[in-house]
């Protein structure tokens, strides 16, 4: 599955033709390459950490093909390195989104529906330190979202309650 690849240590830089970035490409959480895009429209630079990088290049190409199979649009996979750049760009976008969701999740319960990729939030009324009320509030919000969106609710983030916190059985 393509999600075994991720990006860490992402830093966005201003480039001449748009966004550039520096990032570390990880496989199963372990760094395998340092990625650099100067934002000038050319190819990205990939400095492999491992000595047997040819194996990782092939594995990355396979993961890229798997990711493109999940996309709705048809792409010309013969432009292989361009496709790898798009896949790495997608991983960078996921990293930025996760970071934003973690930050926003301190004050909001975040959710996403299948109708679009947009994240929405419901503001918390209780501080995270107020564990019992925070857990009850989360259950109430999840029930409200489930009632409103049903099966179209795809992802929920920013939940802070833990299993050892007493939950309210009926939050409606």
Image (spheres, rainbow, N blue to C red):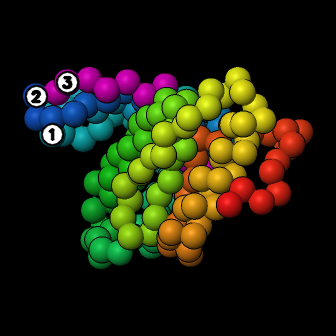
Q: Is residue 92 above or below residue 74?
A: above
Q: Is residue 16 above or below residue 72?
A: above
Frontmost residue, 77 versus 19:
19
Mark sitting earlier along the chain (3/1): 3
Distance, label 3 to label 1, CA atoms, is 12 Å
Residue sticking out furthest to the front: 172
Looking at the picture, how far across and down is residue 9, in whole percent?
Answer: 49, 25
Verify whether residue 144 appears in magenta. no
Q: Does any portion of residue 40 appear in the rendered image?
A: yes
Residue at image x 60%, y 53%?
Answer: 141
Q: The C terminus appears in which quarter of the rendering? A: bottom right
Distance, label 3 to label 2, CA atoms, is 7 Å
Looking at the picture, how far across and down is residue 75, in whole percent?
Answer: 29, 71
Q: Is residue 51 above or below residue 69?
A: above
Q: Which residue is mark 3?
A: 14
Distance, label 1 to label 2, CA atoms, is 8 Å
Query: On the rendered structure, is 130 left or right of 96?
Result: right
Residue at image x 37%, y 55%?
Answer: 118
Q: Does any portion of residue 95 appear in the rendered image?
A: no
Q: Which residue is mark 1?
A: 41
Q: Residues within 10 Å of mark 3 (few under 14, many from 20)?
A: few
Residue sticking out furthest to the left: 16
Judged by depth in the image, the label closer to the viewer, 3 or 1, is 3
Label drawn at residue 95:
none
Looking at the picture, how far across and down is residue 124, in whole percent?
Answer: 55, 37
Residue at image x 70%, y 23%?
Answer: 129
Q: Are marks 1 and 2 in contact (CB under 8 Å)?
A: yes
Frontmost residue, 136 versus 62:
136
SS at circle 3: strand
Looking at the picture, how far across and down is residue 100, in whole percent?
Answer: 44, 35
Q: Which residues are magenta?
A: 4-15
Label drawn at residue 16:
2
């Amino acid at each position: 599955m393509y999600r075994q690849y991720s990006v860490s240590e992402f830093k966005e830089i201003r480039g001449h033709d748009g966004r550039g970035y520096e990032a570390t490409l990880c496989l199963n959480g372990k760094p395998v390459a340092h990625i650099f895009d100067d934002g000038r429209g050319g190819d990205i630079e990939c400095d492999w950490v491992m000595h047997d990088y040819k194996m990782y290049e092939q594995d990355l190409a396979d993961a890229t093909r798997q990711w493109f199979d999940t996309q709705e649009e048809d792409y010309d996979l013969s432009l292989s390195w361009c496709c790898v750049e798009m896949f790495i760009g997608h991983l960078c976008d996921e990293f930025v989104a996760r970071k934003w969701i973690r930050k926003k999740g301190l004050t909001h319960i975040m959710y996403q529906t299948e109708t679009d990729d947009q994240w929405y939030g419901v503001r918390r009324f209780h501080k995270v330190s107020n564990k019992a009320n925070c857990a009850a509030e989360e259950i109430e919000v999840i029930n409200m979202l489930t009632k409103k969106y049903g099966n179209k609710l795809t992802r929920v983030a920013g939940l802070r309650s833990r299993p050892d916190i007493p939950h309210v059985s009926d939050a409606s």
